[in-house]
Image (cartoon, rainbow, N blue to C red):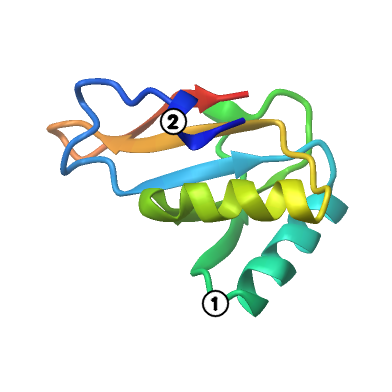
């Protein structure tokens, strides 16, 4: 996946600051988190929200949307496979929802 191929919706303004990366295995999530920390990329492991959990790993990584190009480069360089990438959005009432931006 090339960063330029990822299309953000017109909602992707100020209310979209982070992305969630999902995985098929916890091993892949832990591996990417470790590599990202070494590269000083802010990333945290969170429980995968039920809205985007499709039977894969129960953990996802959250990072700033501006770091997605670096994270995708690390996935390629270290052969870490991910399932999907979602933008994390907030509606007017403050509820979070998710929009898939990459497979």
**Image height of 9 relative to 48, above or below:** above
From where the camera sits, is residue 34 visible?
yes
Mark earlier in primary sequence (1, 2): 2
The alpha-carbon separation of the residues under discs 1 and 2 comes to: 23 Å
Disc 2 residue crowd, few under 14, some 14–19, many 20+, Cα 10 Å? few
Q: Residue at x 82, y 51 (%)?
A: 28
Q: Residue at x 45, y 44 (%)?
A: 19
Residue 84 image-quadrant placement: top right
Q: Residue at x 52, y 43 (%)?
A: 20
The answer to whether mark 1 and mark 2 are in CB contact below 8 A is no
**Image height of 98 relative to 74, above or below:** above
From where the camera sits, is residue 47 visible?
no
Disc 1 residue crowd, few under 14, some 14–19, many 20+, Cα 10 Å? few
SS at mark 2?
Answer: helix
**Image height of 44 relative to 18, above or below:** below
Q: Nearer the viewer, residue 82 or 39?
A: 39
Q: Residue at x 80, y 56 (%)?
A: 78
Q: Which residue is the site of mark 2?
A: 4
Q: Is residue 7 left or right of residue 53?
A: left
Tell me, for residue 68, which label it has, or none.
none
Number of labelled discs?
Answer: 2
* Residue 12: x %, y % from top left: 24, 32
Quadrant the N terminus occupies? top right
SS at mark 1?
Answer: loop
Q: Which residue is the site of mark 1?
A: 40
Quadrant the C terminus occupies? top right
Q: Nearer the viewer, residue 11 or 55?
A: 11
Q: Is residue 80 left or right of residue 103?
A: right
User: In front of the other: label 1 or label 2?
Assistant: 2
Residue 92 image-quadrant placement: top left
What residue occupies the far left of the structure in this picture? Answer: 92
* Residue 46: x %, y % from top left: 59, 55
């Amino acid at each position: 996946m090339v960063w330029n191929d990822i299309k953000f919706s017109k909602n992707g303004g100020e209310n979209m600051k982070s992305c969630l990366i999902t995985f098929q295995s916890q091993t892949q999530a832990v591996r990417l988190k470790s590599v990202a920390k070494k590269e000083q990329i802010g990333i945290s492991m969170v429980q995968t929200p039920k809205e985007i959990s499709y039977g894969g790993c129960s953990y996802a990584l959250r990072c700033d949307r501006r770091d997605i190009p670096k994270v995708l480069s690390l996935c390629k360089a270290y052969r870490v496979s991910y399932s999907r990438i979602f933008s994390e959005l907030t509606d007017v009432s403050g509820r979070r929802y998710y929009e898939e931006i990459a497979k």
